[in-house]
Amino acid sequence: MEKFADFPQKALKYQAEVNPDGRIELQVPLLPGAHVTVFIVEEPDTFNDLTHAAQTSLDFWDNPLDDEDWNNA
């Protein structure tokens, strides 16, 4: 098991998009050959539920009787 050094470690945070070929490319302020540990955390789509709810509830508004009432108001 590898032991981490006792000196402070710098944490860098990047937000990136996965390329169609499944790769992530980042420009980092590290020397070539530096050893790093990478954690990948997928960001949740926080608006997915709201978008789905908005799209599925549009049928409520597509009502010819209601349209007729509102158009003649």
Image (cartoon, grey):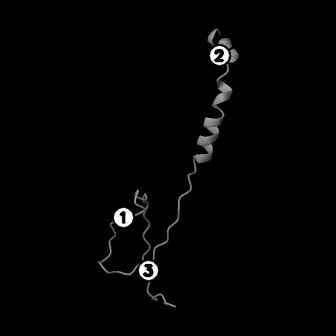
Which is in the foreground here, disc 3 or disc 2? 2
Q: Which amino acid does label 3 sit on?
A: Gln
Going from N to C along the chain, the mark reached first, 3 or 2, is 3
Q: Residue at x 62, y 46 (%)?
A: 49
How many labels, in total? 3
Locate the C terminus and report the quarter of the image it occupies. Answer: top right
Q: Kindly identify which numbered label has been placed on residue 9.
A: 3
* Image: 58 above or below 67: below
Which residue is label 2 attached to?
Answer: 67
Q: Is mark 1 on a helix, strand or loop?
A: loop
Q: What residue type is labelled 1?
A: Glu
Q: What residue type is labelled 2?
A: Asp
Q: Is mark 3 on a helix, strand or loop?
A: loop
Q: Residue at x 68, y 12 (%)?
A: 69
Q: How far apart are marks 3 and 1 (CA)?
A: 22 Å
Which residue is label 1 attached to?
Answer: 25
Q: Which residue lies furthest to the right in this view?
A: 65
Q: Distance between the residues labelled 3 and 2?
A: 63 Å
* Image: 2 above or below 48: below
Q: Which residue lies furthest to the top in this view?
A: 72
Quarter-wise, where is residue 11 in the image?
Answer: bottom left
Going from N to C along the chain, the mark reached first, 2 or 1, is 1
Q: Nearer the viewer, residue 2 or 5?
A: 2
Q: How crowded is mark 3: few (under 14 residues within 10 Å), some or many (20 or more)?
A: few
